[in-house]
Image (cartoon, grey):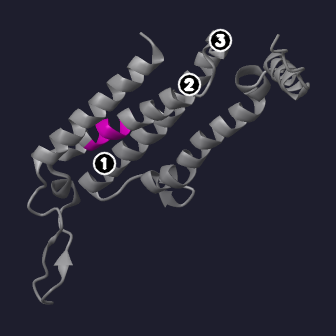
């Protein structure tokens, strides 16, 4: 399957999940309930109930979006440079990004279910993953881009070919005679 077909399949799947979310409808207490004393104010209530049955759909949507981001990263690399090592580095990044996302989501749902959870660097686990995990997963790709620029993005052979084309374009051409 070609990469562009994978991207199309991911976009169709994202569309399907968005349609499912649209028709799922939110739970009645999604925006809170009326405050018993102060008029015009809402109170949250049960967080897990506010997710309703949409939690797994939202988690699936984010998973598909993460996969789409990685597929689009691959699309930015010339096909001749998409080597086995490139796909391995991209797969590690995708696994890291998905691990952060699923850790964040599952720890948040666990916190909503029982109101407590583990702390990491003084933050609840889901908050710590949002603050540090997303940054570290993105930093992996910055490091990969810096390290792999000459290997995957713009190798020396491509630069030499570009310079040859540029030199050829800069050379004045003799007009052809009309004889």
User: Residue drawn at (43%, 41%), measured in percent from left and top?
Assistant: 101
Q: Residue at x 88, y 28 (%)?
A: 170
Q: Which residue was labeled with disc 3?
A: 80
Characterize the local packing of mark 2: few (<14), some (14-19) or many (20 or more) Cα atoms within 10 angstroms.
some
Nearest the eye: 39 or 109: 39
User: Mark 2 or mark 3, which is nearer the start of the sequence?
Assistant: 2
Element marked by disc 1 = helix
Q: Which mark is residue 110?
A: 1
**Mark with earlier residue (2, 1):** 2
Q: Alpha-carbon neighbours of circle 3 within 10 Å: few (<14), some, or many (≥20)?
A: few
The image's mark for residue 74 is 2
Judged by depth in the image, the label closer to the viewer, 2 or 1, is: 2
Element marked by disc 3: helix
Rounded to the nearest angstrom, the CA distance separating label 3 from label 2 is 12 Å
Q: Nearer the viewer, residue 59 or 115?
A: 59
Majority secondary structure of the magenta segment?
helix
State the separation of the CA atoms marked 2 and 1.
34 Å
Task: Tell me what residue is drawn at x 23 percent, y 41 percent.
Answer: 18
Percent position (x, y) of residue 154? 76, 25
Q: Which residues are magenta?
A: 58-63
| 133 lies left or right of 10 | right
Vertical relation: 149 (above or below) 42: above
Where is residue 92, by image quadrant?
top right
């Amino acid at each position: 399957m070609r990469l562009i077909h994978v991207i199309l399949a991911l976009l169709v799947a994202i569309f399907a999940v968005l349609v499912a979310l649209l028709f799922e409808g939110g739970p009645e207490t999604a925006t809170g309930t009326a405050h018993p004393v102060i008029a015009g104010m809402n109170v949250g209530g049960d967080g897990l109930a506010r997710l309703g049955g949409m939690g797994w759909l939202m988690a699936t949507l984010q998973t598909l979006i993460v996969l789409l981001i990685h597929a689009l990263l691959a699309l930015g690399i010339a096909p001749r440079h998409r080597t086995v090592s490139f796909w391995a580095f991209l797969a590690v990044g995708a696994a890291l990004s998905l691990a952060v996302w699923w850790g964040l989501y599952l720890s948040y749902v666990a916190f909503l279910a029982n109101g407590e959870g583990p702390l990491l660097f003084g933050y609840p686990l889901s908050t710590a993953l949002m603050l540090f995990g997303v940054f570290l997963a993105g930093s992996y790709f910055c490091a990969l881009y810096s390290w792999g620029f000459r290997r995957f993005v713009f190798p020396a052979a491509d630069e030499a070919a570009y310079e040859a084309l540029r030199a050829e374009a800069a050379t004045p051409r003799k007009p052809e005679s009309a004889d």
